[in-house]
Image (spheres, rainbow, N blue to C red):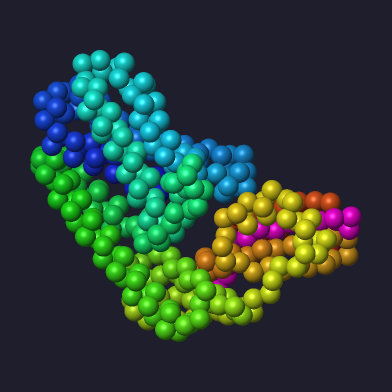
C-alpha cells in the first residue's frame, strides 16, 4: 500500500490494541504501542530510500529483503530496542506483540497489490502479488480516516476499529470475487492464454488486463464484468543480436527485465547510436505505455545512457536520457 495508507493503518492498529487489557490498563504501554504500531507499519518500506540512488536499484530491491520473513522477525526487535528505553514501565511482551502485528500486517496487505512482495524470502525469491487491491485504495484509506475521526470524537477505539476491520475483510473478499469474474471473462475471450495478469485501479469496477498466448500479447480493460481488448501485439522473441546482448548488460534494463513479466521490445538505429527500448504492457494509460527501459549504445556497443521508470512523454524521456537525436 502507499505510505499514507500504512500510516492510518498504524494508528488504527494502535487503537485496536486498546482491546488488550495489558494495553488498556497502562498508559505507558498504550502510548508505546501506538508509537510502535505507527513505526511498524512504515519500517518495511525503509528501502524507499534506494530511489535516491537510482530507479534500477529501487526496482530490484523495493519490497524485497525488507519484506522477507527474517525482516518481519527482526523489525519488531529493532523497534523495541529504540522505543522501550523511553517507556521502561510498558509491558514488554505486549509491546512486542503489537509491534510484530504492525510489521506483519504491512507485509501481508502488500501481497494483495499488483506489485507484490518477496515475502517468502529466503525460501523463495518469487514475487507474491495477488493483484486484488490497488496500491492506493480510496475505500480502505477513507474508512481508516473515518475510524480515526470517530475515535477523536470520543468513541471506543477498540470497538470502532474492530468493526472497521470486519468491513475491510469483507471488502477484500468482494474484490477477490470481482477479479475472479474478470478472469473468467478474459479466459472466454482468449481461451488459449498462457498468462493473464489482472491489476486493480483506483476505480472500484475497473481493472487493467495484460495477457498472452503463443502468438500475441493482449492489453485490455475490465469494467465490472465486461472485458475489452484495446491493443494486440504480435509476439516477437527477443533476438540474441550483439546490440540486444550489449543492452541487457545495462543495470537499468536488467532491473526492468527482473521486474516486468509482459513486455515488447524495439531497436532503433540512428546515425551514430542504437536505441533499445523495452515496454511494459501492464500499465496502459490513455493509449500510452509509460513504464519503460531504454538503453542507448554507440556504434561500438558501449553504453551512452540509459533509463528505466515512468515516462509520460517522449520529450521527458529525452530529457532523462540527456540525448536529443539529430
- Residue 221 lies, with reference to residue 20, above or below; the image says below
Residue 246 image-quadrant placement = bottom right
Rendered view: 159 above or below 257: above
Q: Residue at x 14, y 50 (%)?
A: 163
Is-magenta flag for residue 287? yes
Q: Position of residue 273 (x, y in %)?
A: 84, 60
Q: Position of residue 247 (x, y in %)?
A: 76, 56
Figure quadrant of the C terminus? bottom right
Q: As rendered, which of 271 and 214 lies closer to the eye?
A: 214
Q: Residue at x 33, y 41 (%)?
A: 104
Q: Is residue 325 visible?
A: no
Q: Looking at the picture, does residue 228 appear above or below residue 162?
A: below
Q: Position of residue 190 (x, y in %)?
A: 48, 82
**Viewer-side residue, 249 vs 54:** 249
Q: Is residue 144 visible?
A: yes
Asked where in the image residue 15 lies, by quadrant, the reply is top left
Residue 288 magenta-highlighted: yes
- 301 with respect to 179 (left or right): right
Q: Which residues are magenta?
A: 286-301
**Picture quadrant where residue 44 is located:** top left
Rendered residue at 64%/69% (across/down): 264
Amino acid at each position: 500500500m502507499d505510505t499514507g495508507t500504512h500510516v492510518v493503518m498504524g494508528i488504527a492498529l494502535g487503537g485496536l490494541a486498546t482491546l488488550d487489557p495489558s494495553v488498556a490498563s497502562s498508559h505507558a504501554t498504550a502510548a508505546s504501542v501506538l508509537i510502535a504500531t505507527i513505526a511498524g507499519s512504515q519500517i518495511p518500506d525503509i528501502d524507499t530510500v534506494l530511489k535516491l540512488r537510482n530507479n534500477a536499484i529501487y526496482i530490484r530491491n523495493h519490497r524485497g529483503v525488507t519484506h522477507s520473513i527474517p525482516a518481519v522477525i527482526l523489525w519488531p526487535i529493532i523497534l523495541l530496542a529504540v522505543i522501550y528505553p523511553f517507556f521502561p514501565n510498558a509491558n514488554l511482551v505486549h509491546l512486542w506483540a503489537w509491534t510484530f502485528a504492525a510489521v506483519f500486517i504491512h507485509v501481508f496487505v502488500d501481497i494483495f497489490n499488483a506489485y507484490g512482495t518477496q515475502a517468502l524470502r529466503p525460501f523463495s525469491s518469487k514475487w507474491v502479488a495477488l493483484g486484488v487491491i490497488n496500491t492506493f485504495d480510496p475505500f480502505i484509506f477513507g474508512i481508516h480516516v473515518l475510524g480515526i475521526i470517530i475515535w477523536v470524537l470520543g468513541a471506543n477505539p477498540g470497538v470502532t476499529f474492530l468493526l472497521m476491520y470486519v468491513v475491510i475483510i469483507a471488502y477484500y473478499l468482494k474484490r477477490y470475487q470481482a477479479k475472479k469474474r474478470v478472469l473468467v471473462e478474459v479466459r472466454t475471450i482468449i481461451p488459449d492464454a498462457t498468462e493473464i495478469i489482472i491489476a486493480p485501479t483506483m476505480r472500484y469496477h475497473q481493472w487493467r488486463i495484460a495477457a498472452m498466448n503463443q502468438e500475441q500479447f493482449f492489453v485490455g480493460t475490465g469494467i465490472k464484468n465486461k472485458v475489452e481488448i484495446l491493443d494486440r501485439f504480435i509476439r516477437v522473441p527477443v533476438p540474441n543480436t550483439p546490440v540486444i546482448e550489449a543492452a541487457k548488460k545495462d543495470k537499468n534494463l536488467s532491473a526492468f527485465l527482473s521486474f516486468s513479466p509482459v513486455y515488447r521490445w524495439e531497436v532503433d538505429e540512428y546515425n551514430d547510436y542504437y536505441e533499445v527500448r523495452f515496454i511494459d504492457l501492464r500499465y496502459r494509460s490513455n493509449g500510452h505505455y509509460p513504464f519503460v527501459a531504454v538503453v542507448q549504445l554507440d556504434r561500438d556497443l558501449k553504453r551512452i545512457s540509459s533509463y528505466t521508470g515512468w515516462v509520460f512523454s517522449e520529450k521527458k524521456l529525452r530529457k532523462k536520457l540527456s540525448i536529443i537525436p539529430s
